[in-house]
Amino acid sequence: PDGKKGGMNIRKAEKGYSEDAGFAINGGKGWEHVEFQNHQIDCHGEVALAMGTYYFTCATTGDVVKVEYTFGYKRNSDGKVRICLHHSSVPYAAKETDSFHWRIAFEVFTNWRAG
């Protein structure tokens, strides 16, 4: 993305996204610790996929941020294992109105399935 229509750079703020102070630098506060908690590692041919959660500790406040991740690993032609896929995101937090919509969707699905 070009920074104007929808993508946010985790390393630095881009024009049009003043609220993005850069996750990697934590808005200038930095991170003092990160703890990985692997949930699952699956191997698919020459690619291994790891999914889990990491917890970042802010270097100035001590606050902990929970982040979910997916990494893909593949051996390069030089024989070294490299990251070929990465995605991280803060877990979704449902709002009260979201729960209401899910209840309606579940009811519709249940009625449809019952025939």
Image (tube, rainbow, N blue to C red):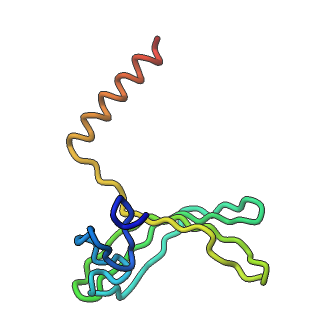
Question: Residue at 32% across / 72% down in the picture?
Answer: 65
User: Which quadrant is home to the N terminus?
Assistant: bottom left
Q: In the figure, is residue 21 to the left or right of 55?
A: left
* Number of numbered discs on residues: 0
Question: Residue at 22% across / 84% down in the picture?
Answer: 61
Please state the horizontal and vertical placement of residue 98, each as a whole percent of the image.
Answer: 26, 41
Please state the horizontal and vertical placement of residue 69, each as a whole percent of the image.
Answer: 48, 66
Q: In the figure, is residue 84 to the left or right of 30?
A: right
Q: In the figure, is residue 10 to the left or right of 101?
A: right
62 is higher (above) or lower (below) than 72: below
Please state the horizontal and vertical placement of residue 93, each as a whole percent of the image.
Answer: 29, 53
- The furthest residue to the top: 115
100 is higher (above) or lower (below) than 86: above
Please state the horizontal and vertical placement of residue 47, each as a whole percent of the image.
Answer: 71, 65
Residue 96 quadrant: top left
76 is higher (above) or lower (below) than 71: below
Residue 6 quadrant: bottom left
27 is higher (above) or lower (below) than 99: below
Question: Residue at 71% across / 62% down in the picture?
Answer: 43
Residue 63 quadrant: bottom left
